[in-house]
Image: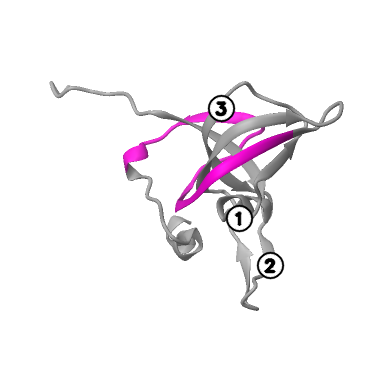
Amino acid sequence: MSKAKATALPEIKVLSVKQPHAHNIVGGFKKIEHRTWHVHYRGQIYIQASGKPVKVKFETGETDFLPTGLVIGRVMLVDIVKKGHSDFEWVLEKPEEIKPFKLKGQQSLFIRVVDTSKIEVVDNYFEWVNLAK
C-alpha cells in the first residue's frame, strides 16, 4: 500500500433525460424540464442522455443521430415550481456542454462518484461523441 495521501473522489448529481431533450437542455434551448416529482436539492446537475438514439435534422439542414448513454453537459437547477397535482417544472440555468463520458443512467436524480478533474467544458459536445463511445 502506498503511503501517499488518498482523497475521496467527489460525487456528482445526475439526471437522465431522453434525447432530443438532453441535447436541447445542454445547448441552452430548453430551460424547463417537466417531472412528476420534485427534490429539495438546488445546484449543479449533470445531464445524461438516455433512451434510444434519435435521428434529428439541425437548423443547418444536416441530419445525424443524437447520442445516448453519455453525460453530455451540466446545468444549475435553480428552482422547482409545482404546476398542478403531479407536474413540476425544474428551472434550469447556466448550461454547459462537456466532453461526453459514458455513464449508465437510472431513474430519479442519482449520485455517482466521478473524477471531476477530467471533466472538460467544450463548445460542442457533439464533436467528441465518437471518442466517448
The numbered dot on residue 42 is: 3
Mark 3–mark 1 distance (CA, rounded to whole Å): 21 Å
Task: Tell me what residue is drawn at x 58 percent, y 34 percent.
Answer: 77
**Boundaries of the magenta span:** 89-117
Type of residue at label 1? His
Q: Nearer the viewer, residue 84 or 14?
A: 84
In the image, which is nearer the foreground, mark 3 or mark 1? 3
In the image, which is nearer the foreground, mark 2 or mark 3? 3
**Main SS class of the magenta portion in the image:** strand
Find disc 2 in the rendering and name its residue: 56
Q: The residue tagged with tag 2: helix, strand or loop?
A: strand
Q: Position of residue 19 (x, y in %)?
A: 67, 53
Q: Position of residue 93 (x, y in %)?
A: 56, 42
- Image position of 110 (left or right of 54): left
Q: Quadrant of the N terminus?
A: top left
Find disc 1 in the rendering and name its residue: 23
Q: The residue tagged with tag 1: helix, strand or loop?
A: helix
Q: Is residue 109 magenta?
A: yes
Q: Are marks 3 and 1 in contact (CB under 8 Å)?
A: no
Q: Are marks 2 and 3 in contact (CB under 8 Å)?
A: no
Task: Tell me which label, 2 or 3, sits earlier in the chain.
Answer: 3
Task: Tell me what residue is drawn at x 66 percent, y 33 percent.
Answer: 107
Q: Residue furthest left?
A: 3
Q: Nearer the viewer, residue 52 or 83?
A: 83
